């Protein structure tokens, strides 16, 4: 007899429905409001919707349910990733308090909510069709968001992202088709059959699938889109992309990595490019004069660290990867919030030169930015340092000591790139940069909260349990 969809299935995806439905509410309010709804009305509705969705998702932690006949797996793994995605979206929306045209704010908020719902779907996706649906929902909205700034670089970044991301999606979809041919099923659980090791469609399909995943994670050499797109996209969109795309895609990769048979052999090339990303991303940071491009290359290296934590598919590895992703979220979003406070719509604060003498002009922001950069560099005692130590231990215990060596080498290289910015802020011999920017309360609140959360994760390093990415 066929398995019918029940109310339990709909409850499993209720946080996604709240976020997606909230986007429609934002547009409806803007439609009925005289002229256009004020900026803060759209943002307030968007943040409130995310808060409700995040609260409901948190109440389901510890509960496991196989929804839609294996299409969506509710459990601790999905809930934790959904919370990271929701928090990132809230912080990113807050940065729009002073960016962008007010008459576009309802559309921007709706697009960000739809993109967020796509990433949340990826967090619980347990079959190939659901993965692709979530990925496209995430990406289609981002194509539009990247081109919303009134400058040529923004439209160029949207076009580059559209073309390259569509190509990567083609690889991903072709890989899925081959995996379906090998297993006769779209569920990830079907990939656990040991007999697949002798099937060439499994190896070829898995390879194409992982190429698409590597593109979305910005791993080398599939990272070429990220610096240009990060630089051209509006600053809040860049902040959103830097965390949410990584969170959704890392969730998909983790579920795939923990279910495939003989995973060491199939995933070994993926871990090799993660190691290359740790070194290459940090080396590329050294030559950057734009902070958004610097953080793009930083994201390449940081994605390499997170993927490295999953080597060996151990129970501790996924917990440490989630811990580091959470710390990276607050470190990265905090840095972008500081840039926002030094910028107008022209994003002057994105230039590293804008940080010259910042300690003399705005000492609080200089201290916060230094803290975020030191944490990203893994300087003790910060959550970034602790996260890297945990990943190192997972690598060594899983027999991937060479990844641990590459992580240490990449961290050493990154110190110079981050200290370059810190030196500019505190060097008294540097001529102070121009005093521009905004006094947006939401951005200041974002900086303060990110500092608090990074400190909390440093001294209270909670690594969530019950987060094994099961597929059935």
Image: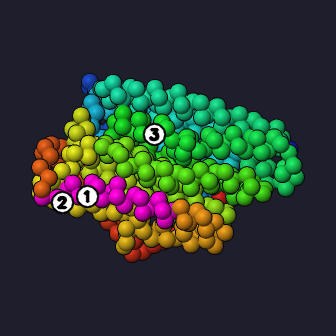
In this view, the mark in front (1 or 3):
1
Secondary structure found at label 1: helix
Q: Give the mark nearer the N terminus: 1 vs 3.
A: 3
Is residue 380 in view? yes
In this view, the mark in front (3 or 2):
2
User: What percent of the width, then of the height, locates residue 151?
Assistant: 30, 26
**Disc 1 to disc 3, C-alpha distance:** 24 Å
Quarter that holds the N terminus: top right
Circles 3, 2 touching at the beta carbon (< 8 Å): no
Secondary structure found at label 3: helix
Is residue 123 in view? no
Quarter that holds the C terminus: bottom right
**Label 1: which residue?**
422
User: What percent of the width, then of the height, locates residue 450?
Assistant: 33, 59
**Label 3: which residue?**
226
The residue drawn where x is 52% and y is 38% is 138
From the viewer's perspective, is residue 345 above or below residue 314?
above
Q: Which quadrant holds residue 446?
A: bottom left
């Amino acid at each position: 007899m066929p398995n019918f969809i029940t109310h339990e299935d709909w409850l499993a995806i209720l946080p996604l429905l709240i976020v997606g439905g909230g986007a429609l509410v934002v547009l409806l309010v803007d439609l009925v409001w005289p002229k256009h709804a004020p900026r803060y009305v759209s943002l307030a509705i968007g943040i409130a919707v995310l808060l409700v969705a995040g609260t409901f998702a948190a109440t389901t932690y510890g509960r496991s349910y196989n929804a839609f006949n294996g299409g969506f797996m509710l459990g601790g793994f999905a809930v934790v990733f959904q919370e990271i995605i929701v928090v990132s979206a809230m912080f990113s929306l807050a940065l729009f308090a002073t960016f962008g045209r007010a008459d576009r704010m309802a559309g921007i908020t709706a697009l960000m909510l739809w993109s967020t719902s796509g990433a949340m779907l990826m967090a619980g996706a347990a079959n190939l069709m659901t993965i692709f649906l979530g990925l496209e929902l995430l990406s289609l909205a981002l194509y539009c968001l990247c081109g919303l700034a009134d400058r040529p670089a923004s439209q160029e970044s949207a076009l580059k992202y559209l073309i390259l991301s569509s190509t990567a999606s083609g690889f991903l979809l072709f890989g899925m088709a081959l995996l379906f041919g090998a297993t006769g099923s779209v569920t990830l659980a079907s990939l656990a059959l040991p007999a697949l090791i002798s099937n060439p469609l499994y190896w070829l399909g898995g390879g194409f699938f992982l190429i698409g995943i590597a593109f979305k994670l910005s791993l080398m050499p599939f990272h070429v889109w990220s610096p240009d797109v990060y630089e051209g996209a509006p600053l809040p969109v860049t902040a959103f992309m830097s965390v949410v795309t990584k969170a959704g895609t890392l969730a998909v990769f983790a579920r795939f990595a923990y279910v495939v048979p003989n995973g060491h052999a199939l995933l070994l090339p993926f871990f090799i490019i993660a190691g290359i990303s740790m070194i290459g991303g940090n080396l590329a940071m050294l030559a950057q004069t734009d902070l958004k491009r610097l953080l793009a290359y930083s994201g390449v290296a940081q994605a390499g660290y997170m993927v490295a934590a999953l080597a060996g598919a151990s129970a501790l590895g996924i917990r440490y990867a989630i811990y580091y992703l959470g710390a990276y979220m607050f470190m990265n979003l905090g840095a972008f919030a500081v840039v926002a406070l030094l910028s107008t719509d022209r994003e002057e604060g994105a230039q590293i030169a804008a940080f010259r003498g910042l300690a003399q002009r705005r000492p609080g922001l200089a201290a916060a930015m230094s803290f975020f950069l030191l944490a990203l560099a893994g300087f003790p005692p910060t959550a970034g340092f602790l996260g890297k130590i945990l990943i190192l231990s997972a690598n060594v215990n899983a027999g991937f000591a060479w990844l641990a060596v590459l992580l240490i080498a990449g961290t050493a290289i990154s110190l110079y790139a981050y200290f370059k910015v810190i030196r500019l802020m505190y060097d008294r011999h540097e001529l102070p940069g121009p005093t521009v920017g905004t006094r947006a309360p939401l951005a200041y609140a974002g900086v303060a909260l990110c500092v608090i959360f990074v400190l909390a994760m440093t001294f209270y390093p909670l690594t969530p349990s019950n987060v094994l990415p099961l597929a059935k």
